[in-house]
Amino acid sequence: MRSVGNFTPYRIRMSKEKLVEVNTAGFILKPDSPEIKPLYEKIKAQFEAKGISVMLSEKSAKMIGLEGVPFEEMCAKADFLVSLGGDGTLLSLVRRSYGHHKPVVGINAGNLGFLADITLDDVDAFLARLLLGEYRIDDRMMIEGYVQKSSGEKKRFIAFNDVVITSPEPSKMVRVNASIDGERFNSYTGDGLIISTPTGSTAYNLSAGGPILYPLTQAFIITPVLAHSLANQRPLVVPADFSIELDAEKYRAIASIDGQEVYELEEGDILYIAGAKKGAKLIHRKEHNYFSVLREKLHWGDRNW
C-alpha cells in the first residue's frame, strides 16, 4: 500500500482466496450463436493443452451440435466456470450457478466486456498464470430478493447487476414507493427505478445518470429513470446491510432482473431487496485494474472518441 504525504490511504481489501484445484473448467457459450463453435473448439484445445479438462453445458453443446452435461452437474463437478461470450453470458452464468458458489471467469467474445475481461488473444497467457496461482478472485456483491404477491405467494430471485422497475407498456409512467428497513422515504414518479449493485453501476444505472461505484464496494444505488419531478428524484447510495421495499402504487409494473428475468407487479405486491449472503466470485488477471477498464471502455481522457 502506497503512502501519500503523511498518511496511508484506506484500501478495500482484496480477497486472497485461491482455487483448490485447477483441473476442470465448466463452460457455457453465448446463447443463440452457433457460429461460436470454431472459437470454442480452439479455446477448449488451449485449456486441454494446459492439462485442464473441459465440460460443456448441455444447452450450449446442443446449440453447436455436440454432447454436453446437465448444467447443475457441470457446476457441481467443475473447479471453476467459464463464460464464452459477452457480459450478458457471464451475468446469466453467475446467477444460474449461484447456489454452487464456484468462481467464474469471462472470456470476451462480445463487445464491451466490463465483466468478461479476458480477451481471445490473452487466453494462453491467462491459463499459464492461472496454473501458477498468479490471479485473483474478487468477491462482488449480489442482490437477493423476492416479489410478495398480494395473495402471500413469494417469488424469489438473485441479481448480479440490477433490479429495474418499469411499466409493461412503452411510454407509460410508474409511481414507485420506496422504503428502507420498513420506513418509507420516497416516491418516484417517472419511467422507472433502478436498484443497482456496484458491479451494475456501469450498466443501465450509468445510462440513467447514476454514479459509478468501485465494484468491491458494498452498497445499493437507487436511480430514477427519466423522473417526472426533479425536486426529490436524485440517485441515492445506501449501505448494503439495509433492506429495500418497493411497490408500484396504482400502476401495473414489471421488475426486470439483470435484464434477463421478468416479474409482474400488481397493486398490493411488494418487491423486497437485500444484499445476498454470499457474493459472486470473479476470477481476474492479477494486474486487472478497474480504473484502466473504465478509461478504455468509456474513453475517459480520449479527445478523439
Image (cartoon, helix red, strand yellow):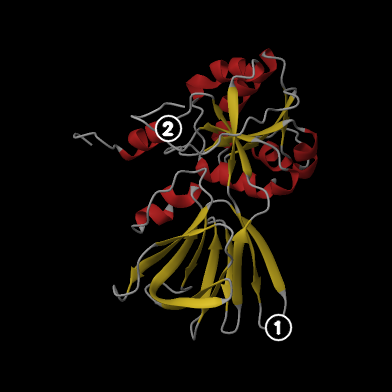
Q: Position of residue 200 (x, y in %)?
A: 48, 50
Q: Residue lying furthest left in this view? A: 303
In the visual, does 233 lie left or right of 58? left
User: Looking at the picture, does residue 215 appear above or below residue 251?
Assistant: above
The image quarter in which residue 235 lies: bottom left
The C terminus lies in quadrant: top left
Q: Nearer the viewer, residue 3 or 215?
A: 3
The image quarter in which residue 155 lies: bottom right
* Circle 2 residue: 8
- Disc 2 secondary structure class: loop
* Circle 1 residue: 151
Instruction: Using the numbered discs, state the Cα–Cα distance from disc 1 to disc 2 in whole angstroms.
Output: 54 Å
Q: Is residue 69 visible?
A: no
Q: Of the two numbered discs 1 and 2 on the same chain, state the one appearing first in sequence.
A: 2
Q: Amino acid at mark 1?
A: Ser
Q: Position of residue 33 (x, y in %)?
A: 55, 39
Q: Amino acid at mark 2?
A: Thr
In the visual, does 194 lie left or right of 104? left
Q: Is residue 227 visible?
A: yes
- Circles 1 and 2, Cβ within 8 Å, touching? The answer is no
Q: Position of residue 294 (x, y in %)?
A: 37, 38
Q: Nearer the viewer, residue 160 or 136?
A: 136
Q: Residues within 10 Å of mark 1 (few under 14, many from 20)?
A: few
- Disc 1 secondary structure class: loop
In the visual, does 146 lie left or right of 120? right
User: Looking at the picture, does residue 23 appear above or below residue 185?
Assistant: above
User: Looking at the picture, does residue 261 appear above or below residue 54?
Assistant: below
Q: Position of residue 160 (x, y in %)?
A: 57, 51
Residue at 52%, 43% in the rendered image: 216
